[in-house]
Image (spheres, helix red, strand yellow):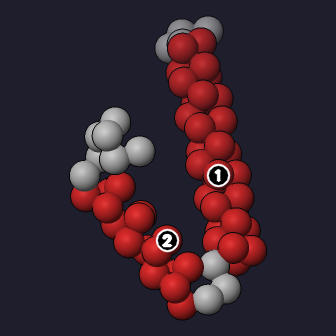
Amino acid sequence: MPGHNPNVYFTSVVFGLKLMAVIIVADATLSMFHSFCKERLSIGIAAFTATFLLILPSIWSQ
């Protein structure tokens, strides 16, 4: 088959699996947020921590 490149299929499958992993982790994170963050204080702590980790990503912030 001219123009047939099996690497394209492999790359597409890997991309699809990565996308599925992102969706699963996002769903789990949202479920945990709804389970644990029911008060204003816990929501504030979660928001501050997420902001801190996004602004200063390093090994020390974890």
| Circle 1 residues within 10 Å: few <14, some 14–19, many ≥20 | few
Q: Quadrant of residue 32?
A: bottom right
Residue position marked by numbered label 1 in the rendering: 25
* Residue 39 visible in the snapshot: yes
Q: Amino acid at mark 1?
A: Val
Residue position marked by numbered label 2 in the rendering: 46
Q: Which SS class for mark 2? A: helix
Q: Amino acid at mark 2?
A: Ala
- Looking at the image, which residue is at 25% across and 52% down? 56
Residue 18 as seen in the image, left or right of residue 28: left
> Which is nearer the N-term, disc 1 or disc 2?
1
Spatial separation of the CA atoms under disc 1 and disc 2 = 17 Å
Residue 32 as seen in the image, left or right of residue 26: right
Look at the picture and state if 60 lies above or below 9: below
User: Where residue 38 appears, x then y in whole percent?
Assistant: 67, 85
Look at the picture and state if 46 lies above or below 55: below
- Looking at the image, which residue is at 54% across and 14% down? 7
Q: Quadrant of residue 55?
A: bottom left
